[in-house]
Amino acid sequence: MPLFKHITLALAALAALGFALPPPAGAQSTQIRRFVGIYSATRQGADSAQQLLKLELDPGGRAVLTTTYPGYTKSAAGAAVYPQIEKGTWSVANQYAIVHFTRRANVTGNGTHDTYKPEDIALTFSLGFRCTLKLERDDANLFGKDGLKMQGHGC
């Protein structure tokens, strides 16, 4: 029996036993490239303020979520309203992008921000039709029952 058939039979036997081979080296980078980009969404916040969300997923595995509040400079109590920035990492697992935010700060103006505070938030997205990110899992329940859909830029 030729060597190729031996290898094929051995791989089939391993698969039948539940063993899986890792994806080819190029497959993981292809999945990553599918998700890399900038995505945005507009939604109503819990306090009825409109929120503009911008999520950046870079090829190096860094994730940044910026939340701004268009038209709001002061809260009902008179406190200043600043955009929020959350930073962390992201990776691909099967057809999902897992985003893990580990720190948050308020942007106070001209590219400056207050001190980052630790956080631990994991979001799982799927990539849908026409570059739409759909939130599939929200461990911190940030986006409630309506979830979140974000549109990719340049698609």
Image: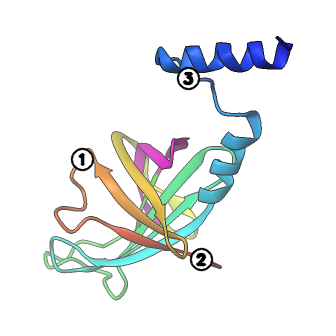
Q: State the residue at coordinates (56%, 61%).
A: 56
| Location of residue 59 with respect to 3 vertically, above or below | below
Outermost front residue: 1
Q: State the residue at coordinates (31%, 73%).
A: 81
Q: Amino acid at mark 3?
A: Ala
Q: Which is more toward the observer, 146 or 129? A: 129
Residue 60 pos. (x, y %): 68, 45
Separation of marks 3 and 2 at Cα, in angstroms = 35 Å
> What quarter of the picture does the C terminus occupy?
bottom right
The numbered dot on residue 153 is: 2
Residue 43 pos. (x, y %): 30, 77
Question: Image quadrant of residue 136?
Answer: bottom left
> What quarter of the picture does the N terminus occupy?
top right
Majority secondary structure in the magenta region: strand
Q: Which is more toward the observer, 26 or 111? A: 26
60 displayed left or right of 45: right
Q: Amino acid at mark 1?
A: Ala
Q: Amino acid at mark 2?
A: His
Q: Which is more toward the observer, 123 or 106? A: 123
Q: Which residue is mark 3?
A: 20
Separation of marks 2 and 1 at Cα, in angstroms = 26 Å
Q: Secondary structure at mark 1?
A: loop
Residue 145 pos. (x, y %): 16, 63
| Residue 94 within the magenta-colored segment of the rendering | yes
Q: State the residue at coordinates (55%, 41%).
A: 91
Task: Tell me which segment is drawn in magenta.
Answer: 87-108
Residue 34 pos. (x, y %): 63, 58
Asked whether the beta carbons under mark 1 and mark 3 sit within 8 Å of each other, the answer is no
Q: Which residue is mark 1?
A: 140
